[in-house]
Image: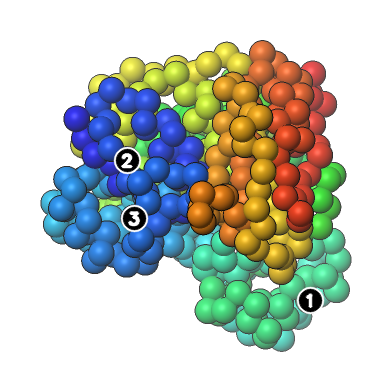
Amino acid sequence: MVNILIIGSGGREHALSWKLSQSEKVETIFTAPGNGGTPNNVPINVDDLDGLVDFAKKNNCFTVVGPEAPLAAGIVNKFNDHNLKIFGPTQQAAQLESSKIWAKNFMKRNNIPTSRFEIFDDAKKAQKYVESLDYNVVVKADGLAAGKGVIVCSSDDEAKSAIETILIKKTFGDAGNRIIIEERIDGIEASYIALSDGDVALPMATSQDHKRIFDGDKGPNTGGMGAYSTTPIIDDSLAKKIQEEIIDKTIHAMKNEGILFKGFLYAGIMIRDNEPFVLEYNVRMGDPECQPITMRMDFDLYDYFEASVGGKLSSMPTPTWKKQSAVCVVLASKGYPESYPSNEEISGFDSISNDVCVFHAGTKKTDGKILSNGGRVLGVTALGASLEDAISNVYAAVEKISWPHKYCRQDIGQKGLSYF
């Protein structure tokens, strides 16, 4: 039996702990720092690498890293130095997410399909470049910005404003010291996530995130307002193309450059005319994609984490999945992704049926009550025989949960239905 330490405090971490707790090999799961729904919370922040090492050592833990910030800070390297087992990529491998510029240059030199781009640290030069183009662009901060450092533009004026926001106003701090201006590829976006041990990468179930705050994909980007799995947008032939031309190519190119990529590799894919392009890499499971994907897992996740760390994924059977669809609707605090209220009591958990999981994110437990404590508060996730059934089931559950400033999109999964 093994103890597990899950690092993070979001819905992804709650979903991972929920799935890992089903393994017969797992004894106790700790979460640092956790939230109002996670088990055995440990008051150690994700940036306290020494504190996390000490806890894992004293409690003989296999550690799983949820969010990107500790990966970018080199937590895996530190744990490896102490001969502690930890699931996730090293600091060098995490550059695929921690520096969008590093990732774009990596894709360019390894011929991995992505959009045309240029790099700038001077706002005037960047704005002049925009004027020279005959296509719309996306402006991206180089560093980590909690999923919000990407501004999709529909005109030169919008692009110039985005440049000013990132480079001059420093809205994203040092993450925006440099920017990428890339061609905007209009198509359909989906998420493709694989589990790698540095040599091979096993695909997870496909999914689609909903990044904008309002229905119909309107408004600013968020960390994700909901997701569903599996998505009809990626059929078998397209999945094969993404796996071979993007995922496998990325893992092998990283290895050729002297970097073993272990952990979850996430490719945000834009599909245009049935051709996939990489919008961005993440070096961890997506959030909220993790929630519907874990609900559909029909295998022992711990076994695959252990095989990833040990470099033995090639000996593992192909992961199997429940045939049902799963949908996650994120319940947020009204005002997110800008300012929003906190410390509001949440009610309705008792009325949720067993076939629905409510994964906590921005919550805390105080005097036995669950209070809102963040922008994205809960990820209500349900299975269904079809995508339509799963949507119906999840929104029925959403109605039962309430707090004064609850907000959610009403159209999660509808993109998938339009394919049937």
Residue marked by disc 1: 161
Distance Cα–Cα, label 2 vs label 3: 10 Å
Residue marked by disc 3: 42
Residue 118 in view, yes or no: yes
Viewer-side label of 1, 3: 3
Residue at the spot 15% in from the left edge and 53% down from the top edge: 58
Q: Earlier in the sequence, mark 1 or mark 2?
A: 2
Q: What residue type is labelled 1?
A: Ser
Compared to 48, does 126 lie above or below?
below
Q: How is the image coloured?
A: rainbow
Secondary structure, mark 1, is helix
Tell me the quarter of the picture where residue 125 sits: bottom right
Q: Which amino acid does label 2 sit on?
A: Ile
Secondary structure, mark 2, is strand
Tell me the quarter of the picture where residue 304 sits: top left
Viewer-side label of 1, 2: 2
Secondary structure, mark 3, is loop
Residue 291: image location, x then y, percent: 55, 36
Towards the viewer: 302 or 249: 302
User: In the figure, is residue 252 to the left or right of 376?
Assistant: left
Image quadrant holding the C terminus, namely: top right
Image quadrant holding the N terminus, namely: top left
Distance Cα–Cα, label 1 vs label 2: 46 Å
User: In the figure, is residue 205 to the left or right of 39?
Assistant: right
Q: What residue type is labelled 3?
A: Val
Residue 186: image location, x then y, percent: 77, 47
